[in-house]
Every structure is written in structure tokens, then in C-alpha cells.
Amino acid sequence: MLWTPYAVRLLLLTALLTASAPSLAFEADVHYGLTHWLALQTGFDPLAAQIIATGDQRVDSGDMQFIDVVALYACPGKDDVGARRAGSHHYPTAGSVPGPLETRAVSPESDAARKAALAAIKVSPSQAAYMLLKLGEALHILQDSWSHQGVPDVPRFGDAAFGCDAARAWGHPKTRGGASSHKADLTSYWPADTVAMAKATYDLLTQYPLISGQKRTARTWEEIRPALDGFIKASTKTGKAGWFVAHGVSDVSFLEGISLPDGAKAFEQQWPGRKLPPLAAKESRQHAVDADVLDFYNRFFARWLGTEDFGAVAAQFGASPDGKKEKHAEASTAAANSELGMRLKLWRLRDHGSVAALAHTPGPLTTPQRASLDAIAKRPNAYARYPAIAAAYFPLLPHGDDVSPLLPFFVSVTTPPGGHPHAMAVAKFRHAPYDIVGVVAERIGASWRVVSIVSTVDH
């Protein structure tokens, strides 16, 4: 077999993609799937198209350099570097960070949104084969300028003790559903924006330099535009998968975790394209956190992720009547722990897309909502399960004065004036990659008890 320089370069890139890969914006149906398909339509060969799409998708927590969760840079943590980086990747704007929300509005295909993509297509032809991941990264930024257009909203993440700093926070604009909704990223709600985004992506792909001088033959936009209607309208993973398979993309594992319900068939495939280091252990080794609260959360998460008896977890770690025998105290404790148990169940469901809207509903769950959760929980393989508890998490890396280890969850502690100490542990789970979850606990006497589960959409 004759190996051309082009083939050797792509072989090396393939090794880069797969060797380190474990087995927030428009989601993976766009950032990987649609980008991959458009690259094929513009004449890139299948491997090059895969590399471009992987570079695009990794911007959504697929590499440590892209894991900037709002809880660490704006609420309750404060990190200007993380806030700026999250903005540059998902909310391209000319506004300064930190800065007022109204000065950080995002406009589709603005100069800020196009800057990285225009630089990517100006790469030297001699380097074109090596810069496909960077091309994908640049396309991601441009694509998000449509889904995140408008003035950013401020996430509501817990009570005032853990409020978000509006000068640093990024959330889906209210005109796109708001910070607690995935609506901004779902194509069926925004058909015109999705078409405009796809056309801009197509145009840039056609302008990328030839790789090793090999000519690419692109289909015209007029040829491919009608096919997009089915992609845009698909509102389940099954529907999206069917569209891709019908249009020549047979591996649809990238749809894992998108905020759409499975649909007619359970979707249990796993995408191997992330490049994330494994956690050394399931326990957190976070610095500058008291041992008692860290031990409490280590025990809580191990129990929560290691069982499907969520009522028992709530009873063990949730509200306690503190020895009081009054009926109202016992009833209040039972109600609080019942709600906690349902929230714990909700966040362990594998098909998170089926409960994504419910997950961010404020206030106690209603009787019909509880019945819906119970019905989903009775499906085969209903819960997310992992070979080890540490594998359930996206690794987090807080920025501070010292060097932190990778963490499964990040803990903040505060004491409100005249109140008990409160803590929040923030985690990002592999089966819900477009959300973060906060476990709020209160210390009463010598004991920490979980008082609520809070959450927000994360890019």
C-alpha cells in the first residue's frame, strides 16, 4: 500500500483522536453530527470530516481546556479567566468580562463570532491537515452565536447564599428560553436560525485550504438545503439518529446525552470522542475545605451514585426531626425527604432528555410530575450506571492560588448572618452533559444534612 503524506498526517490525527479518548450551546446533534455531515457535503473525506466534527464537539466539555462551569467562575466561585474563556467559546461578544450583561450581548455571525473561523481558514496549506481540530473549535464558536443570541441571562443556582455574579455569569438569554432552559439549543424551536447557522458553516468549510493539494468537490447549497428540514424537525434522539443514518452517517453515538428524549427506542450508545483524564478516585481531595463537610459529601455521592434506593439515601442524608416527636415535625421531615428522594431519582435517570425540562422546575414536584418520573424509572435500564463511581463525573479543575487536583465535585461553604453554615457541592454528570447539579446542605449542631438539589443549564 502506498502511503501519501496526506494519509500519514490523517493517520497521526486519528491516533490523537482515539488514544486519549475515554470509552453547551447547540448540542452534539449540531456540533458533531451536522458539522460532520456538512463537511462530507463540502468534499472532505470521512476521516477529515470526523476530525473537524470532533474538534467542534469537544468545546462542549470534551477536553479539560473547555470545562468551565458557571458554578466555578460565577456562582458561587469567582474566576475571571474561566468566565472569559466560557464567553469566548460559547457567547462570542465584544463586551468585556467582567462587565454588565447588556454590554455582553451576542449577535449571530458577528465579528467576534467569526474571528476564530476566519483565522482558521487562513491557515497555510502545508498545515491544513494538522489544523482540522482547530477548524472545528472555531466553527463551534460561530455556531453558538445563533443559539445564544441576545443578552445573557443570570442562572438561578440555589438561594442567595450561593447566588451568581451577573458581571461574570453566562446563561441562555431570556428570549431563547432563559438560563434554566435547554430551549436555546434545540433545533426544532429555531428553524430559520438553524438554516442560517448551517449555511455559514457550509460557506467556511468550502473556503478551507486544500489538504496536501487534494481537490474537494462540494455539493451546492441548493442541493443540500432541503435535507435540513428533517434534521431540524426531529425532536427525539431516535428521530435525529434516523435522519443521520438516512443521510450517510451511520455512527450516531455522538447523540449520547443531548437534551432530547430517547423516543421510540432506548438510546444507549456512548460517544468515545472526549479527551478527558480519568479521576484518580471517587473521593474529592479539594483543598481548603473542612474535613467534616468533605467527608459528608464523599459519603453522600458514593451512596447516591451506588444505589437505586433513593428513598433510603434521602432518609440517611436528608432532613431530620432532631429527636422531636411532634407530628408536624415528623410530617415536615417526611415531605422534605420525599421531595429529595424524587430529585435524586430524577438526576440518575439515563434518558435525561425525557426529564430535562422537569429537572429545572422550581418548587416541589407535583403529583403528576412524580408519577411521570416513576413511569420513566420503570423502563428497562432506566438509570445511568457506571463501571466505577468516579466514571460518573466530568472532572473539575478550580483555579486558585494553589494547584488543585482534579475533582469529582466542587464544594463551597458559607454562613449566612445569624444562620447555620451552608454548603453546596457542584457536579457535572456524564449522562447529563449540558447541566450542572448542586447539592445544598446545612449544618445543624454537629451534623450536615442535605436540604435541596439545585441545577442549571451549563452552556
Image (tube, rainbow, N blue to C red):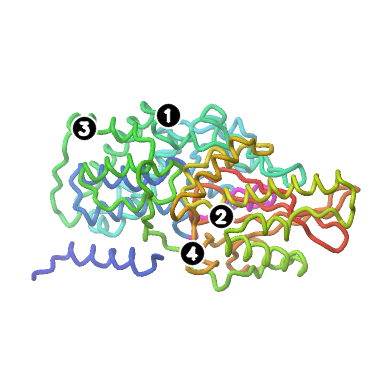
Task: Find out whether residue 200 is within the magenta segment.
Answer: no
C-alpha separation, residue under disc 1 versus residue under disc 3: 22 Å
Amino acid found under the numbered disc labelled 3 = Trp
Of 332 and 427, which appears nearest the observer?
332
Badge number at residue 386: 4
Examine the image and state in which quarter residue 443 appears.
bottom right
Q: Position of residue 95 (x, y in %)?
A: 56, 37
Mark 4 or 1, which is nearer the eye? 4
- Which residue is labeled 3 in the image? 221
Mark 2 or 4, which is nearer the eye? 4
Amino acid found under the numbered disc labelled 4 = Tyr
Badge number at residue 428: 2
Query: Which label's residue is closer to the chain start, 3 or 2?
Result: 3
Q: Do residues under tags 1 and 2 come within 8 Å of each other at their CB atoms?
A: no
C-alpha separation, residue under disc 4 versus residue under disc 1: 33 Å
Residue ID at (44%, 36%): 145
Mark 1 or 3, which is nearer the eye? 1
Sort mark 2 into few (<14), some (14-19) or many (20+) by Cα contacts within 10 Å: many
Mark 3 falls on what kind of element?
A: helix
Residue ID at (49%, 49%): 378
Amino acid found under the numbered disc labelled 1 = Tyr
- Which residue is labeled 1 in the image? 189
Q: In this view, does 438 lie above or below 206?
A: below
Give the magenta-colored segment's residue range: 64-81
